[in-house]
Amino acid sequence: MVLAGGEGKRLMPLTADRAKPAVPFGGSYRLIDFVLSNLINAGLRRVCVLTQYKSHSLDRHITQTWRMPTLLGDYVTPVPAQQRLGPRWFTGSADAIFQSLNLVYDEEPDYVVVFGADHVYRMDPMQMIEAHIDSGAGVTVAGLRRPRESASEFGVIEVASDGHRISNFLEKPADPPAIPGSPNESFVSMGNYVFSTDVLLEALRVDAADPSSVHDMGGNIIPMLTEQGRAFVYDFNSNIVPGATARDSGYWRDVGSLDSYHDAHMDLVSVHPVFNLYNRRWPILSNIPPLPPAKFVEGGNAHESMVGAGSIISGGHVRTSVIASNVIVETASYVEGSVLMPGVRIGRNAVVRNAILDKNVVIPQNAQIGVDLEHDRLKYTVSPGGIVVIGKGALVLP
């Protein structure tokens, strides 16, 4: 089960018209493609994606892209909030699963994998499942090693002296507990869980009957099972993905803010990228549009950049940027440190620096974006890190 119902408020305006997992990423993908690719590559091919907010483009992407062969009963299917338990929407991630338990009853699995939908990473979930089965845990939580000084931004896992059993689950603690044997690191939760089915069902029923609960997986279900001594941690660093390089092994990014979304794109474009999209042994899968190759004419060029199919760099200059499909960069224009989504048009002599331009944004001739941030703040969204973000379909005035 993939949890894909979040609003993604911190990614506005990119989420003004779409669910967060449907936000485009990396020129050719949507955020949800990363978790689905991990599951499918690992052989987990009965996948329900629980959706809620502004889900049309997400539902369409899943149904058009993630078509599985039906001979063996495989499927990837979006499941909207169905109000099976009354006229109410999902009130939290645990409630989303509780309201969708008919999916579990239909399949009668021994284990249920519950992953988030909006992180950028590679992982073999089957290795985590095997560790869960071997440990005899009720739930296994994927833990990412982070320096203690930065771990307080996340939910932190305190581990018992055996290095496996979770002794406490802390939400953004001021003094994160260290990993046994590694005093400068803490485990933070990746939001990925493997449950034994009977344990999951029992915990969800108890949580649903608790009027004080906010019905959240990380905030309620995992602490409940931790108190019972049934929660274990899985060290993400031990996960070995075929084709991973020493540089991008263990890469994981929460792209929940505009700055982190932009930073994750910059991780893609160096000569030796921090995250390598070119790993053919563990590919990130998606629906690539049938477009001709990118074209560079009239001296147009791109350095340390990715340029999608159907794009034309016509006398323009692109540096350290991710250019999606069907983008046009016209003569004497300059694009640097930016993310351009499909259909963007950059007019002659325009300058675009440190910006995120959503689908079909038009930058007119001689316009400047990201040059004068005080001026840009009057018209557009500017992130705390100084990234100018222009929403879907906007026509920028000269």
Image (spheres, rainbow, N blue to C red):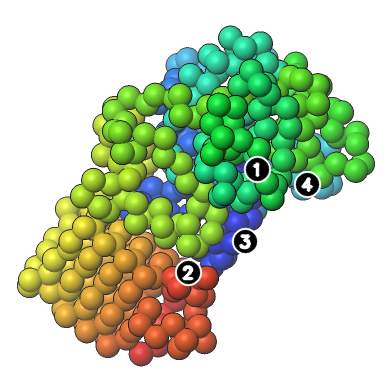
Quarter of the image holding residue 312? bottom left
Q: Are marks 4 and 2 in contact (CB under 8 Å)?
A: no
- Which quadrant does the C terminus fall into? bottom left
Q: Secondary structure at mark 4?
A: loop
* Front label number (3 vs 4): 3
The residue lying toward the viewer, choosing from 304 and 5, is 304
**Distance CA(mark 2)–CA(mark 3):** 17 Å
> Is residue 129 visible in this depiction of the protein?
yes
Q: Are marks 3 and 4 in contact (CB under 8 Å)?
A: no
* Front label number (4 vs 2): 2
Residue 91: mark: 4
Looking at the image, residue 317 sits to the left or right of residue 210; the answer is left
* Front label number (1 vs 4): 1
On the image, numbered disc 2 is attached to which residue? 385
On the image, numbered disc 3 is attached to which residue? 9
Task: Say which amino acid is labelled 4.
Answer: Thr
**Distance CA(mark 1)–CA(mark 4):** 28 Å
Of the image marks 4 and 2, the number of the one nearer the N terminus: 4
On the image, numbered disc 1 is attached to which residue? 176
Q: Please tell me which residue is depicted at 63% across the width and 49% down the height of the picture.
A: 152
Q: Secondary structure at mark 1?
A: loop
Of the image marks 1 and 2, the number of the one nearer the N terminus: 1
Of the image marks 1 and 4, the number of the one nearer the N terminus: 4
From the top left corner, tell me how far across and down residue 351 is, in percent: 28, 80
**Distance CA(mark 3)–CA(mark 4):** 16 Å
Task: Say which amino acid is labelled 3.
Answer: Lys
Q: Is residue 237 above or below residue 352?
A: above
